[in-house]
Image (cartoon, rainbow, N blue to C red):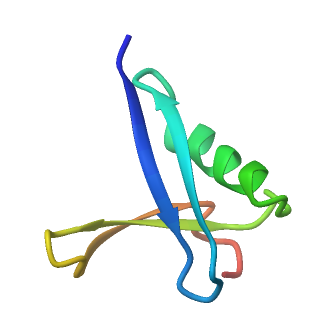
Amino acid sequence: MAIYRFRVAFEDYDAVREIDIKSNQTFEDFHYAIHKAINFDANHSSSFYVSNDQWIKGEELAFMPNERK
């Protein structure tokens, strides 16, 4: 089983985390792993963005998109 390592950075905070996710896990699992890594309440919405090599945001993938961001 493949494992993907993500480097997660936050625009509003000076925090970076590396998070490993198995290939069979979902964005919901990823959402909870991020929140656990920073001790943040996971009952909030999250947005993930596909970006290019220059880190320009593309498509948004939202978890709980109807919740207040």
**Image quadrant for the C terminus?**
bottom right
**Image quadrant for the N terminus?**
top left
Q: Is residue 47 above or below residue 13?
A: above
Q: Position of residue 56 (x, y in %)?
A: 22, 81
Residue at image position (66%, 67%) is 45
Count of residue discs? 0
Residue farthest toward the bottom in the current orientation of the protein? 12
Occupied quadrant, residue 35:
bottom right
Residue at image position (55%, 44%) is 19
Residue farthest toward the left in the current orientation of the protein? 53
Q: Is residue 2 above or below residue 4?
A: above
Q: Position of residue 2 (x, y in %)?
A: 35, 18
Q: Position of residue 28 (x, y in %)?
A: 59, 43
Q: Nearer the viewer, residue 49 or 62?
A: 49
Residue at image position (14%, 69%) is 53
Residue at image position (56%, 76%) is 10
